[in-house]
């Protein structure tokens, strides 16, 4: 088993989403999990998958992850 940190594994999970429902489930996980780094990469991957799935809103992911990024930079 290849164990990775959350901020790396979530990118794989985002890329594996095949429906808006899957993306919503990951959004809940992202919003409720402390993310240590790679905030911009996560946002970018999420936005790209939103485009792929024709989803217009991001479930609050970008706002949440950017807020965590600001906290990490303090």
Image (cartoon, rainbow, N blue to C red):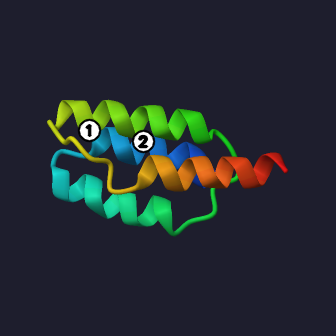
Q: Nearer the viewer, residue 10 or 58?
A: 58
**Circles 2 and 1 in contact, beta carbons < 8 Å:** no
Image quadrant in which you'd find residue 14: top left
Q: Is residue 3 above or below residue 32?
A: above
Residue lying at 37% horizontally and 58% vertically, measured from the top left: 27
Q: Residue furthest right?
A: 74
**Mark with earlier residue (2, 1):** 2
Could you tell me how many numbered marks the image carries?
2
Residue lying at 60% horizontally and 42% vertically, measured from the top left: 39
Q: Is residue 7 above or below residue 33?
A: above
Q: Is residue 55 above or below residue 48?
A: below
Numbered disc 1: secondary structure: helix
Q: Nearer the viewer, residue 63 or 36?
A: 63
**What is the spatial separation of the Cα atoms under label 2 and label 1, in whole angstroms?**
15 Å
Image quadrant in which you'd find residue 59: bottom left
Residue lying at 44% horizontally and 65% vertically, measured from the top left: 29
The 10 Å Cα crowd at callout 1, few under 14, some 14 to 19, many 20 or more, is some
Q: Residue furthest bottom?
A: 32
Asked if one can make out residue 4 in the rendered structure from this viewpoint, the answer is no
Q: Position of residue 19 (x, y in %)?
A: 15, 49
Numbered disc 2: secondary structure: helix
Q: Is residue 38 left or right of residue 17?
A: right
- Residue 74's tag is none
Asked if one can make out residue 17 in the rendered structure from this viewpoint, the answer is yes
Q: Position of residue 2 (x, y in %)?
A: 55, 48
- Residue 12's tag is 2
Tell us which disc is closer to us: 2 or 1: 1
Residue lying at 45% horizontally and 32% vertically, measured from the top left: 44
- Residue 50's tag is 1
Q: Position of residue 54 (x, y in %)?
A: 14, 36
The 10 Å Cα crowd at callout 2, few under 14, some 14 to 19, many 20 or more, is few
């Amino acid at each position: 088993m290849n164990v990775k940190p959350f901020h790396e594994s979530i990118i794989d999970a985002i890329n594996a989403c095949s429906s808006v429902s899957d993306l919503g489930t990951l959004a809940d996980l992202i919003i409720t999990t402390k993310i240590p780094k790679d905030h911009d990469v996560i946002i970018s991957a999420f936005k790209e998958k939103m485009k792929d799935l024709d989803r217009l809103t991001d479930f609050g992911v970008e706002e949440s992850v950017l807020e965590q990024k600001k906290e990490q930079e303090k």
